[in-house]
Image: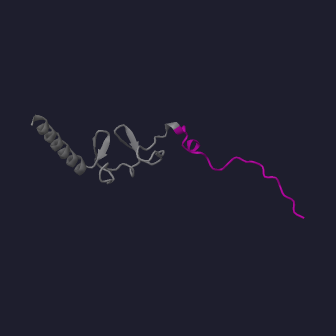
Amino acid sequence: MMQSAAVLPTESPVKSLPEILGVPLQQIPQCAGCSQHILDKFILKVLDRHWHSKCLKCADCQTPLADKCFSRAGSVYCKEDFFKSAVFTKQTFWDEKRRTLA
């Protein structure tokens, strides 16, 4: 006849993230793109916000922005879309100005 043994709670071998890193969870930056904590080797900081390298993308075309990025009104763009929207904005401004004067 088999007897069952009581399982006693033991210390879990799996440690929590703050225990592993030795810092409180509140001090680990969160990504502005996905809202997850950034545990990568590199953290990008753009517009005073932290980003995973895979999450920093152009607001228009969604191209990953690894080397350079441009910003306007709190959004991040690749060079092409930044200047494309700048030309559009300038043209829209002058069109509106002409309508107002007419």
| Farthest bottom residue in view | 1
Q: Position of residue 61 (x, y in %)?
A: 30, 53
Residue 20 horizontal side relative to residue 72, left or right: right
Along the viewing direction, whichever of 18 and 85 lies nearer the viewer: 85
| Farthest right residue in view | 1
Q: Position of residue 95 (x, y in %)?
A: 14, 42
Which image quarter holds the N terminus?
Answer: bottom right
Q: Residue at x 75, y 48 (%)?
A: 9
Q: Residue at x 55, y 40 (%)?
A: 22
Where is 102 relative to 8, above or below? above
Along the viewing direction, whichever of 89 and 70 lies nearer the viewer: 89
Residue 73 magenta-highlighted: no
Q: Position of residue 50 (x, y in %)?
A: 40, 42
Residue 21 horizontal side relative to residue 79, left or right: right
Q: Residue at x 83, y 55 (%)?
A: 5
Q: Residue at x 65, y 50 (%)?
A: 13
Where is 29 relative to 57, above or below? above
Chain part drawn in magenta: 1-25
Residue 14 magenta-highlighted: yes
Along the viewing direction, whichever of 36 and 59 lies nearer the viewer: 59
Along the viewing direction, whichever of 70 and 17 lies nearer the viewer: 70
